[in-house]
Image: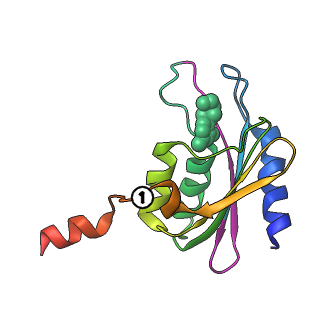
Amino acid sequence: MTREELKAAAVAMLDRSYCPYSHFAVGAALECSDGTVFTGCNIENAAYSPTMCAERTAVAKAVSEGHRDFVRIAVAGRCEEFCVPCAVCRQVLREFAPEIEVICLNGKGEELAMPLSALLPYSFGPEYLIREAE
Ligand code: THU
């Protein structure tokens, strides 16, 4: 999938968003090293805290289907600002792909891209626990 196709896949997921409370739709498209793409949207809940972000929906779909080797994620919103992943989603991506390229889109389809390490510096990851267990 090309970069533009990945971005389009994230934008297409905006229509799947379930966001009756915030009315803030988010779409994501997560690309694996073998080219497989998993999409996601945010899924809100009347109890609020169970709300799933679009990025974590995509990660859950990928990992539960046996994919963990992520290379790029596109995140789309309809907002004026670039739709950046929240801190929880940054940490979830960090678990599997500390250097994944994060492509943030605004409502005009313009992009702001950077490695996850720029969004989450000095991050905590699995290697800390593995070292401690040795
Ligand atoms: N949201 C995401 O889907 N991804 C993010 O990284 C930021 C926030 C969703 C959660 C909620 O449904 C709505 O955006 C407003 O916070």
Q: Quadrant of the N terminus?
A: bottom right
Question: Coloured how?
Answer: rainbow
| Quarter of the rendered structure image containing ligand 1 | top right
Q: Is residue 34 above or below residue 49?
A: below
Amino acid found under the numbered disc labelled 1: Pro
Q: Is residue 109 above or below residue 21?
A: below
Q: Is residue 5 left or right of residue 43?
A: right
- Residue carrying label 1: 121
Bin the neighbour count of mark 1 within 10 Å (Cα to Cα): few under 14, some 14-19, many 20 and up. Answer: few
Q: Nearer the viewer, residue 133 or 117?
A: 117
Percent x, y of residue 57: 59, 48
Can the viewer see residue 43 in this picture? no
Q: Is residue 34 magenta?
A: yes
Q: Which residues are magenta?
A: 31-46
Q: Is residue 118 magenta?
A: no
Percent x, y of residue 96: 46, 66
Q: Is residue 32 left or right of residue 128?
A: right
Tell me the residue at 87%/44% (across/down).
108
Q: Is residue 70 left or right of residue 98?
A: right
Q: Quadrant of the C terminus?
A: bottom left
Which type of secondary structure does the marked residue at label 1 adopt? loop
Tell me the residue at 62%/62% (across/down).
114
Percent x, y of residue 42: 65, 38
Q: Is residue 102 above or below residue 24?
A: below
Tell me the residue at 47%/44% (across/down).
87
Q: Quadrant of residue 52?
A: top right
Tell me the residue at 50%/58% (across/down).
93
Can the viewer see residue 54 in this picture? yes
Q: Quadrant of residue 100?
A: bottom right
Total marks drawn?
A: 1
Percent x, y of residue 123: 36, 58
Q: Nearer the viewer, residue 61 or 83?
A: 83
